[in-house]
Image (cartoon, grey):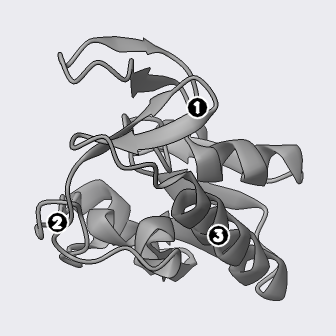
Amino acid sequence: MKILVSACLLGIPCRYDGKSKPNEKVISLKEKYEIIPACPECLGGLTIPRLPAEISGARVIRCDGKDVTDEYNLGAQKTLEIARENDIKIAVLKSKSPSCSNKEIYDGTYTRKLISGKGITARLLIKNGIKVIDEGELDSL
């Protein structure tokens, strides 16, 4: 079975800060599954590094006020295409990300306050029948 995984969790330096968030439990999934890495933000054309962005209402806004909603939507769409091409049923995505989170996102005020919500890509994948879990929910696999 193939699983889509946030590239940053696999140690690929694609986060906004140019770093990664390698997670050994996620990386070890390759022993049981075929891993398909993806970074929706990069797929949407955003650079590495890039300014941080948060969801504010229906928009994704960088910390400097620039609206990057279109890039996030494009990245989500391209991630969905990769998932469909690979017959993905499950995605393991990065928590708290404006793209990937399946539970909590930052509230758009840049005060590090978390609220209940889903990232742009996670929403689209879920809407299309793909189960999305974060790196802390691997026991549910």
In the rendered image, residue 21, in percent from the top left (x then y), is placed at 18, 58
Instruction: Classify residue 92 as left or right of residue 128.
Output: left
- Is there CB contact under 8 Å for labels 2 and 1? no
Q: Which mark, residue 118?
A: 1
Q: Residue furthest front?
A: 65
Q: Nearer the viewer, residue 48 or 117?
A: 48
> Going by the image, does 95 lie left or right of 2?
left
Identify the amino acid type marked 3: Leu
Residue drawn at x 86%, y 44% is 127
Quarter of the image holding residue 114?
top left
Say whether disc 2 or disc 1 marks the residue closer to the N-terminus.
2
Q: Nearer the viewer, residue 127 or 55?
A: 55
Task: Judge whether residue 141 can be spotted in this image.
Answer: no
Q: Nearer the viewer, mark 3 or mark 1?
A: 3
Which residue in the protein does label 2 denote? 20
Question: What amino acid type is highlighted by mark number 1?
Answer: Lys
Nearer mark to the viewer, of 2 and 1: 1
Amino acid type, label 2: Ser
In the picture, the disc for residue 17 is none
Question: SS of the residue at dot 1?
Answer: loop
Q: Residue at x 65, y 72 (%)?
A: 79
Measured from the top left, where is residue 78 in percent x and y?
Answer: 68, 77
Q: Residue at x 81, y 88 (%)?
A: 85
**Location of the N terminus (image quadrant):** bottom right
Residue located beneath label 3 in the image: 74
* Foreground pick, 66 / 25: 66
The residues tagged by marks 2 and 1 sit, at their Cα atoms, a distance apart of 21 Å
Considering only vertical position in the picture, is 41 above or below 119?
Answer: below
**Direction right: furthest residue:** 128
| Label 3 vs label 2, nearer the camera | 3
* Circles 3, 1 touching at the beta carbon (< 8 Å): no
